[in-house]
Image (cartoon, rainbow, N blue to C red):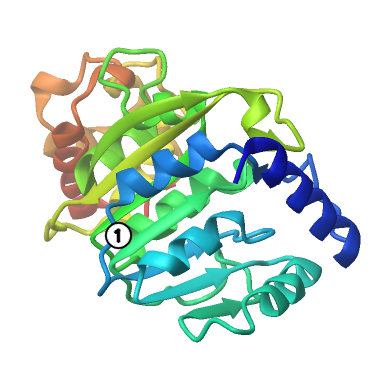
Amino acid sequence: MSGQGLLNRTLRILEEYGIRPSRKMGQCYVVDPELMACVLDSARIGREDVVLEIGAGTGNLTTSLAEVARRVIAVEKDVNAARALRDLFSGRSNVEVVNDDILLMDLPRVDKIVSNLPYSISTPITFKLLFYGDFGSAVLTYQKEVADRLVAKPGGRDYSRLSVTVSLLAEIEKVMDFPPDSFYPKPVVESTVVVMRRRSRGEFDWKFLDGTLKMLFSQRRRTLRKALGTYSKIKKARFEDVARVVDEGLMDARIFELQPSDFVRISESLKKVSGAPA
């Protein structure tokens, strides 16, 4: 189907079912055949694959997924959109429509995940997938600046808690950027298709590590020594006790300069002398 055809189909479904996409929530629907082809080619979905689609919207991508996957679980939070999807795929036995919030529901075990992520909640969705998801790979469309944070390296301006977590739990490949015209309504930013492949999880305490990352990256330009000073005051702990368990060689590095493996070591050290991170 052409780009104009996809746009017309989307507009018809939105009108017929009273669906009102929210710009505030970052809701927009793919109307670009090239973007859809990029996602499908990158996902490499086989006939035996079970695919989770997050935010199925008007079903443009769902239609293509259903043609190649053994089963598609299409999750859609919007009640009217979910109703439209059930009507559209009533004749497809391999499509299950779930009207739920992906951030609140239990994640099903699947082979692949595909999503044009709602931009306002793309980061919390990513954390949930990485911490609690059971999947092999995912092809996700992000706001370009978030995709840049996914692949950011230590010392860069985009390096963040997200960068560290993703690097520890997945391999990330940026595939292609797409303009606002690829969506309806048009977002005000460019978008990037990303492939995420799961790594095996380490044995360390992920919940504690995440709390440590939140605490440290709230002070990203300070040295680790100063950041731990603030941490000690919040935890009502002696700074000497906290500093004693952390590698002295890291203390004068700024938070945004630390390697992902450094954060693991720091987290494991802090766990010895305190409760949950601030």
- Res 148 quadrant in image: top left
137 or 278: which is nearer to us?
137
- 241 and 57: which one is in front? 57
Residue 66 placed where, x, y %?
46, 69
Q: Is residue 250 visible?
A: yes
Total count of labels = 1
Seen from the viewer's position, the closer of residues 251 and 263 is 263
102 shown above or below 228: below
Crowd class of label 1 (few under 14; some 14 to 19; many from 20; radius 10 Å) = some
| Residue 177 position in % (x across, y down) | 46, 24
Residue type at the position of mark 1: Ile
Q: Is residue 253 left or right of residue 76?
A: left
Q: Secondary structure at mark 1?
A: loop
**Identity of the residue drawn at 28% across and 23% down:** 224
Q: Position of residue 139 (x, y in %)?
A: 37, 47
Does residue 275 show up? no
Which residue is painted at 18% across and 26% down in the image?
A: 259
Residue 118 percent location from the top left of the image? 62, 47
Picture layout, residue 75 above or below residue 222: below
Question: What residue is rendered at 43% in x and 67% in y?
Answer: 67
Image-based side of 95 in relation to 270, left or right: right
Residue where numbered disc 1 is placed: 45
Residue drawn where x is 53% and y is 75% of the image: 105
